[in-house]
């Protein structure tokens, strides 16, 4: 997909909570011997997907100087909304002091709700319906105690402000693509606290099939190949999957390195690829081209190509993601259980 | 219904909106509806600076019902960069890490949740400045 | 202010009254006061209670207390003004007498905190003080006092021990008060190492909330002499308010309202602070007691804690503070506390030489509204 008018990223910001728990600590509780990642973030008792979104949006707005009164859409992608019914975006509008003449909705598509929001906003901006829009991917995902997901389900989020390229963007969205199919790898019914999944079925027929289909189709359609990209970010539910999918598609470990955060912060679900993109933009230079491929269970994958412009230096996120990585502190299982509300009866 | 009372306060509670005196520049948080205490001048709404330093603090061990599951928690007496003084809860910091004089910045967090209705009240808290 | 006196007092020991409701608790104390005053016909009743409405115990309390006491007519007025509730009830009664609309008034306060969860009582108290500042910041009343204590320690280089020595003094004096919630002395070590309520304040820096009721019968001095009643005379009073919300004050450690109320009360009584024999502080926290001492003019700024520590206000000294145990040892039935302080002053005049003066300080919140009475003993005997 290409927009009729060129659009791009005007500003960005990412946020992760301060607390991490090591996989070895969780494994000790449940008597497991091997673990998928090293550690994962979890939200403090007073954080949720909305407060994480707020931080990411605030950093994006303040770092880029985006005009608050010209933001015409706030779309929040999340699978861990604080409310089942009551939008997060309206709180963001009032908390960030944005114009109330704005579109606002919550998007849900498992882990790709955030990239879905980018697609929608890119279209709105390109068509001229709005001047600026914010797409957020944010989650405080939950894993049932003892379940495989408990090792990786993490918290974090990122926000992208999208505008027309002629308003001055730090990266142009060159093209995008989306691929979906009915694949029941992972789900959560209404009213349930924890999601369910089909174990190894989440791999080959779900994650790998959809990302590879989406990226290959994108390459065919627009004539790209892995060597055209300086960096790539793939959805990262663990350490292994993004490395393997990169290799299968012909990308090197160097290309995915800056955006591969799951070993330390875990799977931030709707936040995952956007946080990876933010970390990559934190180090990218003018002229760099970045590929991003998300994955959402159920299932689908969005692919994007971003071309970094000369505005990158002045628009970089302040603070960068690294500032949040530098303040991480390790907590024990009992603090994790308490902060996540797992003891509430 | 406290949800309604508190909805009315949301803008200043979310965005650190205070009052500034057009005459002498004195600032107040929460915002005042009446006149300046120092010079009687007219007040206008203003978004206060998000950074400040800690003047004093306490760690609350006996909490009211709404904050029961937050204990122990830290409340700070904070002076913002423009001199405005206010009280706010601190977050992302442990009792043994708090120091008078430390640099803080505002963020938005959940304050409390009404048990029966499930309504979440968000507001400004301060954390050690990042970056 | 000429010729208003108290001719009866009544109070119950502060504590937990599981089997009593708020109305009968008030009636118990009020009946005792009426007995002492030889059962006069009361023209008006003023009842202070900070939380009876907020905690859903009994709204419009005064008419129920009046009915329980068998008062067929006369005013029955409810006053809810935090810690100043019963002080304002007393003031209203005095005004009623001064206006000539009444011959006898019954004034006082009652509080019932044991019917609710302690955390619900705390929530009601902080909303009572300032919903916008305290509720949104999670600040409790003890938390606010703790912030003041740390500021005080930083500003004046004073140790926590010196602040807490006021609580030790309270407990020492409370041993002699039959109505005190706690009648035992405590050591400074014990007070310092007790569990924290709000760091750096321990449970010994915080006056304990309790159920309580205290009432006084007021009339004119002329009437008291005519009836041959012993009395305590109100020689002067002052009322003042400080800025709210408290975050708008330029100096948290300056209790300007208490200072103003004291200066007005002393000048109306035409008595200098040096001629006082005792001072009852509204020390709902050790630190607020210290700040009140400074505001009332008994200590210089930053030296209140030092003075208490050095024994300057002990029972055997010229001006003694909290002679009946203060809020810490007597207990703090919020809206009734001011009436307790006046009852205790009256008790003191019954026992001690009558030609002495006392000052009673009360306030709501943190100096939000302060009331100071200057009182003296007297009687026909």
Image (cartoon, grey):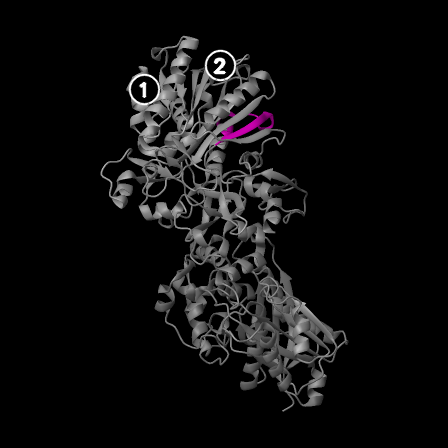
The span shown in magenta is: A61-77
Residue A16 point in image, percent of width and height:
40, 35
Magenta stretch contains residue A335:
no
Q: Chain of mark 1?
A: A
Mark 1 crowd level (few <14, some 14–19, many ≥20, 10 Å Cα): many
Residue A201 point in image, percent of width and height:
33, 29
The structure residue drawn at horizontal position 34% and vertical position 13%, both measured from the top left corner, is A226
| Residue found at the far top of this picture | A223
Residue C356 point in image, percent of width and height:
57, 81
Secondary structure of the residue carrying numbered label 1: helix
Mark 1 and mark 2 lie on one chain; the one further toward the N terminus is: 2
Q: How many marks?
A: 2
Quadrant of res C96: bottom right
Can residue B61 be seen here? The reply is yes
Q: From the viewer's side, name the closer residue of A293 and C373.
A: A293
Can residue C342 be seen here? The reply is no
Secondary structure of the residue carrying numbered label 2: loop
Please name the residue that numbered disc 2 is placed on: A1
Q: From the viewer's side, name the closer residue of B78 and C27.
A: C27
Residue A238 point in image, percent of width and height:
32, 30
The structure residue drawn at horizontal position 41% and vertical position 13%, both measured from the top left corner, is A217
The structure residue drawn at horizontal position 29% and vertical position 18%, both measured from the top left corner, is A247
**Image-based side of B19 in relation to C176, left or right:** right
The residues tagged by marks 1 and 2 sit, at their Cα atoms, a distance apart of 22 Å
Quadrant of res A222: top left
Q: Chain of mark 2?
A: A
Q: Are marks 1 and 2 in contact (CB under 8 Å)?
A: no
Mark 2 crowd level (few <14, some 14–19, many ≥20, 10 Å Cα): some
- Residue B57 vertical placement versus C55 (above, below): above
Q: From the viewer's side, name the closer residue of C153 and A92.
A: A92
**Image-based side of A129 in relation to A172, left or right:** right
Please name the residue that numbered disc 1 is placed on: A246
């Amino acid at each position: 997909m290409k927009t009729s008018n060129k659009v791009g990223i005007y500003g960005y910001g990412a946020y992760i909570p301060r607390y991490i728990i090591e996989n070895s600590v969780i494994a000790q509780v449940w008597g497991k011997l091997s673990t998928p990642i090293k550690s994962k973030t979890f939200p403090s008792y007073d954080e949720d997907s909305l407060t994480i979104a707020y931080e990411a949006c605030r950093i994006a707005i303040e770092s880029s100087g985006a005009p608050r009164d010209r933001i015409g859409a706030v779309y929040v992608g999340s699978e861990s909304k604080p409310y089942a019914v009551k939008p997060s975006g309206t709180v963001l509008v009032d908390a960030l002091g944005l114009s109330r003449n704005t579109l606002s909705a919550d998007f849900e598509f498992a882990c790709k709700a955030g990239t879905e929001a980018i697609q929608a906003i890119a279209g709105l901006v390109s068509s001229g319906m709005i001047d600026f829009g914010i797409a957020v991917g944010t989650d405080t995902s939950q894993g049932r105690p003892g379940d495989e997901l408990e090792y990786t389900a993490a918290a974090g989020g990122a926000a992208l402000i999208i505008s027309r390229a002629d308003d001055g963007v730090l990266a142009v969205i060159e093209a995008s693509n989306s691929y979906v199919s009915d694949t029941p790898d992972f789900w959560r019914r209404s009213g349930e606290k924890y999601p369910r999944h089909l174990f190894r079925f989440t791999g080959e027929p779900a994650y790998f099939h959809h990302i590879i289909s989406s990226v290959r189709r994108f390459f065919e359609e627009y004539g790209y190949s892995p060597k055209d990209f300086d960096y790539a970010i793939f959805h990262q539910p663990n350490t292994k999957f993004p490395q393997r999918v990169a290799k299968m598609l012909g990308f090197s470990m160097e290309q995915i390195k800056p955006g591969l955060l799951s070993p330390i912060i875990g799977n931030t679900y709707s936040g995952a690829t956007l946080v990876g993109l933010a970390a990559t933009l934190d180090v990218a230079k003018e002229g760099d081209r970045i590929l991003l491929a998300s994955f959402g269970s159920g299932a689908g994958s969005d692919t994007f190509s971003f071309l970094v412009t000369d505005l990158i230096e002045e628009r970089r996120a302040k603070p960068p993601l690294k500032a949040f990585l530098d303040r991480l502190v390790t907590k024990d299982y009992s603090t994790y259980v308490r902060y996540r509300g797992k003891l509430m009866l | 219904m406290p949800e309604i009372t508190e909805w009315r306060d949301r803008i200043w509670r979310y965005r650190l909106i205070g009052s500034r005196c057009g005459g002498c520049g004195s600032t107040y948080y929460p915002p005042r509806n009446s006149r300046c205490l120092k010079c009687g001048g007219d007040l206008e709404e203003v978004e206060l600076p998000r950074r400040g330093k800690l003047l004093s603090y306490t760690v609350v061990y006996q909490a009211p019902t709404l904050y029961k599951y937050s204990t122990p928690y830290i409340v700070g007496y904070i002076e913002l960069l423009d001199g405005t003084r206010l009280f706010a809860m601190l977050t992302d910091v442990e009792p043994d890490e708090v120091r008078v004089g430390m640099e803080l910045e505002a963020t938005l967090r959940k304050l409390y949740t009404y048990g029966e209705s499930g309504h979440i009240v968000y507001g400004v808290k301060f954390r050690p400045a990042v970056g | 202010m000429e010729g208003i006196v108290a001719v009866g007092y009544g109070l119950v020991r502060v504590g937990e009254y599981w089997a009593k409701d708020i109305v009968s608790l008030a009636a118990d104390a009020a009946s005792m006061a009426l007995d002492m005053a030889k059962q006069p016909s009361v023209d008006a009743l003023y009842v202070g209670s900070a939380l009876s409405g907020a905690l859903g115990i009994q709204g419009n309390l005064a008419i129920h207390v009046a009915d329980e006491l068998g008062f067929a007519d006369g005013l029955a007025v409810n006053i809810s003004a935090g810690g100043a509730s019963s002080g304002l009830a007393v003031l209203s009664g005095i005004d009623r007498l001064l206006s000539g609309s009444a011959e006898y008034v019954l004034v006082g306060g009652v509080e019932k905190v044991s019917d609710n969860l302690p955390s619900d009582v705390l929530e009601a108290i902080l909303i009572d003080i300032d919903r916008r500042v305290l509720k949104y910041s999670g600040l409790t009343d003890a938390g606010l006092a703790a912030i003041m204590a740390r500021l005080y320690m930083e500003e004046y280089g004073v140790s926590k021990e010196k602040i807490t020595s006021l609580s030790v003094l309270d407990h020492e004096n409370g041993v002699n008060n039959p109505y005190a919630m706690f009648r035992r002395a405590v050591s400074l070590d014990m007070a310092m190492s007790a569990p924290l309520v709000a760091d750096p304040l321990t449970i010994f820096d915080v006056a304990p909330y309790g159920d309580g009721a205290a009432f006084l019968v007021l009339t004119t001095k002329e009437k008291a002499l005519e009836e041959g009643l012993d009395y305590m005379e109100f020689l002067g009073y002052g009322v003042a308010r400080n800025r709210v919300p408290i975050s708008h004050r330029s100096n948290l450690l300056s209790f300007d309202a208490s200072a103003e109320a004291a200066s007005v009360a002393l000048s109306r009584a035409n008595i200098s602070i040096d001629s006082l024999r005792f001072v009852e502080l509204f020390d709902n926290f050790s630190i607020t007691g210290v700040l009140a001492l400074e505001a009332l003019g008994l200590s210089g700024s930053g030296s209140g804690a030092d003075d208490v520590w050095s024994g300057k206000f002990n029972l055997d000294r010229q001006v003694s503070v909290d002679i009946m145990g203060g809020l810490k040892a007597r207990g703090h039935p919020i809206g009734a506390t001011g009436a307790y302080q006046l009852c205790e002053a009256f008790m003191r005049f019954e026992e001690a030489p009558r030609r002495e003066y006392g000052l009673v300080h009360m306030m709501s919140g943190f100096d939000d509204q302060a009331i100071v009475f200057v009182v003296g003993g007297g009687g026909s005997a």
